[in-house]
Amino acid sequence: MARYTESVCRLCRREGMKLYLKGDRCYTERCSVDRRPYAPGEHGQGRKKMSEYAVQLREKQKLRRIYGVLERQFERYFEMASRKRGVTGEALLQILESRLDNVVYRMGLATSRAEARQMVRHGHMAVNGDKVSIPSYLVQPGDVVSVREGSRELTRFKLAAEAAPGRSVPAWLSLNPDGMSATILGLPTREQIDVPVQEHMIVELYSR
């Protein structure tokens, strides 16, 4: 399966902002964006006026990288969103937010979506009591996402459960008291998705 294997810090620097791809490190002085706030590569510090197409492309790349989605999969998500009623850009964000790895991240069980993806792949998560090891699995309103019984004794999940009382989750999720499960209340609205992208530019890009 294809996946990005280079330094993720380069992705943040290329987009000119923190995408929080490395979890806790992004909040420390070791963050590459703070240390080298310019694009990577030989010409990274040069100033260049961007065309309208380039700006639209950067918004798409930014969104892909935030959620850790490769190009072909992102195109499929856009096709799904374009077939839905309502605003295509918002529908696209709702689909990305509905990915199981993102839900695990939003539950506070992982410090980054990459870590959440690993948890899912290793078989630690369940949806409605059934084991799901596919990070791209799309949850639906009413689904219950939880840590599997056999994994709850692992240190990482015990620490997450202890921190549950002070943990904040999006309004479209209901974190259960045990801190290891959550119920999907509904699809998030645009106001509930704290992703710094201008999704209308992505729609314009695919409309060319």
Image (spheres, grey):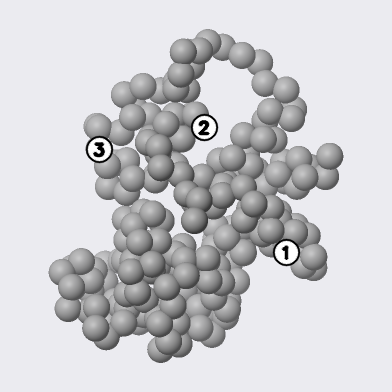
Quick one: label 2, few (<14), some, or many (20+) residues within 10 Å? some
Name the foreground residue: 198 vs 73: 73
Residue 85 lies, in percent from the top left, at 80, 68
Image side of residue 157 versus residue 69, left or right: left
**Which residue appears at 27% of the width and 85% of the height?**
149
Q: Amino acid at mark 1?
A: Met
Q: Is residue 103 shown above or below 114? A: below
Compared across the picture, whether 68 is left or right of 162 comes to right
On the image, which quarter does residue 154 sit in? bottom left
Report which residue position mark 3 lands on: 28
Residue 43 x/y as whole percent: 50, 12
Residue 131 found in image quarter: bottom left
Task: Tell me the CA gap for discs 1 and 3.
Answer: 38 Å
Q: CA distance from mark 1 to mark 2?
A: 26 Å
Element type at mark 1: helix
Residue type, mark 2 in image = Glu
Q: Residue furthest front?
A: 1
Select label 1 or label 2 by which is in front. 1
Crowdedness near tag 3: few (<14), some (14–19) or many (≥20) residues, C-alpha within 10 Å: few
Q: Which mark is residue 61?
A: none
In this figure, which residue is indicated by the disc labeled 2? 15
Task: Determine which quarter of the picture holds residue 127.
Answer: bottom left
Residue 152 can be seen, yes or no:
yes
- Image coordinates of residue 29 in percent, x first then y, are 24, 32
Disc nearest the viewer among 3 and 2: 2
Q: Which mark is residue 80?
A: 1
**In this rendering, would 28 be left or right of 173?**
left
- Label 3 sits on what residue type? Thr
Is disc 1 surrounded by few (<14), some (14 to 19) or many (20+) residues within 10 Å?
A: some
The secondary element bearing badge 2 is classed as helix
Q: In the rendered image, is residue 175 in sight?
A: no
How far apart in space, not on screen, are marks 3 and 2 (Cα)? 19 Å
